[in-house]
Image: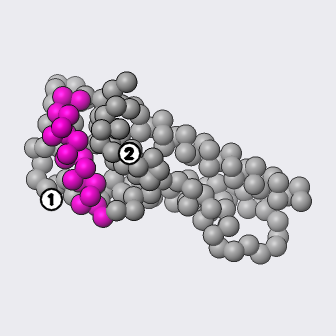
Amino acid sequence: MDNQWAARTGFLAVASVLATCVLVASTRPMPQREGNPATAAELWLSWSNDAREKYVWGFFDGFQDGKRAGCSYYADKITPYMPHESLPPEKLPRSACFNELPSFPQQSKAYVDAVTSYYKKYPTDRQAGMRQILLQLASPPGLTIDQIHEKLTK
């Protein structure tokens, strides 16, 4: 019983830290390169649709790699304290952690369209970097572009 409690407590602690890191990172403004006054909106809107799609695919790939690495690290740390009884695959630490973090359930085109719509509607919003918008579109939180604008410009 003590091992189960320790495992559950450890899982909740690590999942909370990972979720907090994702949410904190999603609210930081996009740093502007020195000598480059262009906003993220100007940059995004200057790209072809193919370039936007590649950016979103690269973001998804990096996000998934980060989730896998974080959850693998967590699983490696918590597994020695897990009970030795067999658990269903979805209850194993790596899977449980991975399933608790945000995901992108729609096709990439939906995210490309949402970022494009955001920047067309709010072209002077210097607080909203591409990464921040994509993270807010993830589920959860799954915000609309208007909710993202309101959150990032408070």
Relative horizontal placement of residue 68, taking residue 14 as reference (left or right): left
Nearer to the camera, 129 or 153: 153
Residue at x-position 15% and y-position 59%: 50
Residue 68: x and y in percent read 52, 60
Q: Nearer the viewer, residue 43 or 149?
A: 149
Magenta span: chief secondary structure: helix
Examine the rendering and report whether any part of residue 29 can be seen: no
Dot 2: few (<14), some (14–19), or many (≥20) neighbours within 10 Å?
Answer: some
Examine the structure image and report whether residue 52 is included in the region drawn in magenta.
no
Q: Position of residue 55 (x, y in %)?
A: 25, 53
What residue is at 39 percent from the left and 58 percent from the top? 104
User: Mark 2 highlights which residue?
Assistant: 143
Magenta stretch, residue numbers: 107-125
Q: Amino acid at mark 2?
A: Leu
Q: Which residue is mark 1?
A: 50
Amino acid type, mark 1: Asp
Instruction: Name the secondary structure under disc 2.
Output: loop
Q: Position of residue 79 (x, y in %)?
A: 73, 61
Of the 4 image quadrants, the one containing the N terminus is bottom right
Q: Quarter-wise, where is residue 128 in the image?
A: top left
Does residue 150 show up? yes
Mark 1 and mark 2: span between their CA atoms? 24 Å
Kind of element beneath mark 1: helix
Considering every residue shown, the one lying at the far right of the view is 1
Tell which tag, 1 or 2, sits nearer the viewer. Answer: 2
Q: Position of residue 139 (x, y in %)?
A: 44, 53
- Horizontal relation, residue 2 to residue 9: left or right: right
